[in-house]
Image (cartoon, rainbow, N blue to C red):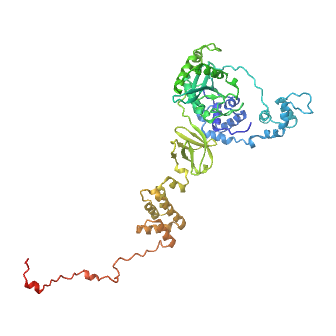
Amino acid sequence: MAYREVHVEEIREVLRLWLGVAGLAPMGLRMIASHAGLDRKTVRRYVAAAQAAGLTREAGAEAVTDELIGAVIEGVRPLRPNGHGQSWQQLEPWADQITKWLAGDLGEDMVTSRKPLTLTKVHELLARQGCVVPYRTLVRFATDRCGWSRSNTTVRIDDGDPGVECQIDFGYLGMYVDETGARRKMHALVLTAVYSRHMFVWLTHSQTLTAVIEGCEAAWEFFGGVFKVLIPDNMKPVVTQSDTLNPQLSVGWLDYSQHAGFVTDAARVRTPTDKPRVERTIRYVQDNFWAGEAFRDLADAQTAARAWSMKVGERIHGTTRTPPLQLFTTDELPQLLPPPATYDVPVFKQVKVHRDFHASVCNALYSLPEQWIGQTVDVRADAVQVRFSVGGRVIKTHPRMPAGTRNTDPDDYPDHKSAMAMRNITTLIAAADRHGTHIGIYMARVLDDRLPWTRMRAGYALLGLVKKYGADPVDTACSRALDFDVISVLKIRSMLDKATEATAPILPKAAGEQITRFARNASEFTNPTPLTVTTTSEDTNHDHPHR
């Protein structure tokens, strides 16, 4: 079996079972390994690391914090080149020989029997020839490299205590025509109580994690509580990697199981005997509920399924000879865990942090610090919060944003990029003011615009002049430019290029200070010439008609 990295939620599950939750007593390492789908030695290492970090069995589940998980991860660093340990590498040269032994090809020196050897005998033969490895490693090696598999046996499993186990499975019912006239597939998620055989049927069009959780939420409301142990089939939303000994549960399902308080014990692949109670129920639902019925839509079918679940609970069960509803009400219902609060189904995924300091989650953008650019991080996003983590350590949290929007933390940007990215002119003015009073005033004048962020490039150019020429010359040039109300970064740069920032400017002379060629003397305009009236003889000899 190849090495795989244990997820932070699996570590949390191990510690949760070690402390004792869901009304159950604290479990031993072997039982924890069985429930968590991990190797017992792996469980021992994580429990030992947690104890070294200060965790005791007297502590409650609230003691399993993110900080404790981070300390446990730091303490457990398995070193396995190529995913396997040294014992596996020691078995590699023996792969062909082990295959022959298990197939019955024993060679010339072994003529006493031609039957295939047992794996225990192979383990002994290897030890004689100097290849001493753990038996469990040989089992995994023979299964993976030599085509060996154990023979399966069927035993009748006891029903267990009331209110503890509930088996869950998906079953395909068939096609139906919905209200729009389209043909749709219908699946049934069936939950069957192992002790009483009381069952609940939830109908859905898909087999996603959201559909499974919705069915479980409806089941807890139907039953009136939560069973302590759920035994699911190897459905993809629950089991991401099936394995006879160590099935890997999905992160989303582990998160929900911790919310509801139950423990998951996944059935083996293609092993219906691991969940016989619900396996027989699937066929019963297909024949007794679905066959011959017609429903208007999904809601109508779900109402009928709930009523049918109550009806069949009143029948006499063939094995227990008692109505499942009666047995459930008297024996199991008092033992159930209380129904959990409404669960907000989160989104678990891995995203890459891009060069713009943002990562996309559900079509919304969230900023992260510069050190994570180019790396892939884990995300948990519910309706309220988006949490980014790496290796089990939370590195950033954001409030959940609608699709098409973004949430940016200015502290995630470097200091020289934050002001521009956030269009923060106050920060830009403060940066200029630290270089000189007149530089700060000049920066404020440069950014004095109805759309100040459109002038930020000029502001950065002014700071660039400080970096190139020094603060004192730029401050002097800004002071000189302010005296004449000249607001132009290009003029400041020109003054610095010519080293004229400290030189008094030559002002143009006023008009009229020098007499030009066609200019008249100003005295001619100070005393105007008096008006002289003259008369003619003609005016004297003839009377004027208006006199």
> Could you say which quadrant of the image residue 274 lies in?
top right
Task: State the residue lying farthest toward the bottom.
Answer: 537
Could you say which is closer to the camera, residue 303 or residue 545?
Answer: 545
Place of residue 166 in the rendered image (x, y in percent of width and height, measured from the top left): 62, 24
Left or right, residue 478 beside residue 135: left
Left or right, residue 109 beside residue 489: right
Could you say which is closer to the camera, residue 69 or residue 332?
Answer: 332
Vertical side of 155 occupied by 355: above or below: below
Place of residue 212 in the rendered image (x, y in percent of width and height, measured from the top left): 59, 30
Place of residue 380 in the rendered image (x, y in percent of width and height, measured from the top left): 58, 39
Q: Residue at x 32, y 82 (%)?
A: 519
Numbered label tally: 0
- The quadrant of the rendering that contains the N terminus is top right
Left or right, residue 111 beside residue 347: right
Asked whether residue 188 appears in the rendered view, the answer is no
Could you say which is closer to the camera, residue 252 or residue 283?
Answer: 283
Place of residue 279 in the rendered image (x, y in percent of width and height, measured from the top left): 66, 23
Q: Residue at x 7, y 85 (%)?
A: 541
Asked whether residue 348 appears in the rendered view, the answer is yes
> Could you say which quadrant of the image residue 382 lies in?
top right
Vertical side of 530 occupied by 236: above or below: above
- The quadrant of the rendering that contains the C terminus is bottom left
Left or right, residue 342 beside residue 141: left
